[in-house]
Image: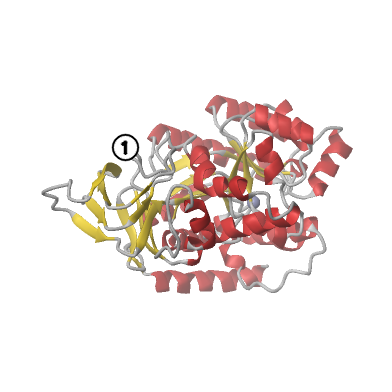
Amino acid sequence: MESILIKNGIILTGNPQQAVLYGHELLLENGKISKIAAKGEIKNFNGKEIDASGKVVMPGFINVHHHFYSTLVRGLGKAAPSKNFNEVLENLWWRLDKKLLMEDVYYSALISAIDAAKHGTTTVIDHHASPGAILGSLNEIAKTIKLTGIRANLCYEVTDRDGECKTLDGIKENVQWLEKVQAEKNEFLKGLFGMHAAFTLSDKTLESIMVEGEKLDCGYHIHVAEAASDEEFSHKHFGKSVVERLREFNLLNDKTIAAHCVHVDEEEMEILSFKKVAVAHNPQSNQNNAVGIADVVKLVGKGILVGLGTDAMTINMLEELRVGLWAQHLKHDPSQGFMEIANTLLRNNAVIANRYWDNQLGMLSEGKAADVVLIDYYPPTPLDANTWLGHVIFGISQSTVDTTICGGKILYQNKKLMLDIDEAAVAAKSRECAVKLWDRF
Ligand SMILES: [Zn+2]
C-alpha cells in the first residue's frame, strides 16, 4: 500500500486535547497514521502527497445505526399513508423487507456504501432485514464493504413476525456471521447479534438468542422504545419495561447498541447506564416517523454513552448532527444540548466503534487507523480547540467532502470516486432491481 503525506490542511485531531493543528503534516503508512509532524520534518518522502490547502482534515465519520437495505425504497409511492409508527412498519417496511431478494440486498448496500465513501463516512454499524433472503445476506453485504473499502459492523435483525422458520434462520445468520468475523479478526468487518425490537420477540426467542449470544460473547443491536407503543406492549404483555425485559435475558452489555430510546423511563436509563449500553440517537428518523425525540440531554446526564446514527435517513453524518442539535433545542430550549449532541458524533461514536475496533478509530493520532476525511473549508472566524465543535456543526457541515481515506486507502479524491466501481452502472442496475421490487411490493 502506497504511503500518503497530507500537507497544508488544518488538522482537527479529535484527540483528548481537542487539538487543532496548523502547519502540520499527516503521514499514513500501512493503514495507520504513522506520524504527525511539523511541516518539513518528514524528509525524503517518496509516496503520494495530498495538498489539503483550503481544507480541514478530520477523522472519518462513524454511523452507529444504519439500514443499508432501505436504499431501494427511495421514491416508492405505493405505501398507504401511515398515522403512527406501527402503521409505518406495517404499511412500508414490513411489506418491503419481505420482498427483498439477495440481489436487492447487494445493490442497496453497494449504493449506500459508495455514498458513505462520498460523504466521508468510513465506518457504518448496520442493522439488516430481508426475511425472504436471510441466510447469506450478511456475506452479500460484506462483498460491498470489501469493494468500497469502508468498515462495517453487521447484524441480522431477528424477529418473530414472519414465523418460526424465519426466526431460526435469523438466529443462524447472526451466529454464522459472528463466528466468521471472530475467526477472521478482520479489520474492516465486525458483527453484533441483531434483534428487531422487543415487541416482535417472544420470551422463547429472547432465550434462544441469549443462549447463542453467550457462547459468542457478543454485543447486541436492537431498536428500543422507538415509539411509545413498544413500552405499552411490554408493560401490557410482560408486566415490565422493554429494558427490564432485555436485562432479564442478559442482552445488555458494553457492546450492546440500543437504537432510539425515545420513550425509556428513568429506571430504564439507570439500567442502560449501569450496563454500559450505548444508545444510538437518530434525530431525523425520529422526526420523520413522528415518534418524539430522545432526550439526549437527560440520557447523557444519567451517564449513558449516546452516539449518533441515521437509521438510513442519510449517510451524511454532518447533516444528522445539525438536525440533532435543532431537535434538542426544540425539546428543551436553545441553551441546552450543544455539547451533548456535538459529542455524539465527534467523540462518542468513536468510543462505541472502538468497542469492536480495539481503540483504532475516530481520532487523528499516531498509531490510529488511517481513516481520514478532507473537507473544503476556509474558516471565517478563529478555528481552534475551543471553537472547532461550533465550526463543525454550523460551517463545516455545510461544506463539501473532497477526499475520503479508509485504512490508508483513498476511496474518494478531488470529489471523484477512486474505486474500481462504475457508479453509473451500479445505479442503473439498482434502478432495475427497484422497479422489480416495487412491482412485487
Ligand atoms: Zn433502525
Q: In front here: 116 or 168?
A: 116
Q: In front here: 118 or 349?
A: 349
Residue 395: x %, y % from top left: 50, 63
Please name the residue shown 39% across and 35% down the image: 185
Furthest-right residue in this view: 236
Residue 94 appearing in the image = no
Please name the residue shown 52% across and 73% down the image: 432
Q: In front here: 90 or 25?
A: 25
Name the quadrant containing residue 312. Answer: bottom right
Residue 325: x %, y % from top left: 63, 55
Furthest-left residue in this view: 44
- Coloured how? secondary structure
Rendered-image quadrant of the C terminus = bottom right
Residue 344's place in the image compared with 421, above or below, is above
Write down the residue under mark 1: 367
Amino acid at dot 1: Gly
Please name the residue shown 50% across and 36% down the image: 178
Residue 437's place in the image compared with 352, above or below, is below
Name the quadrant containing residue 410. Answer: bottom left
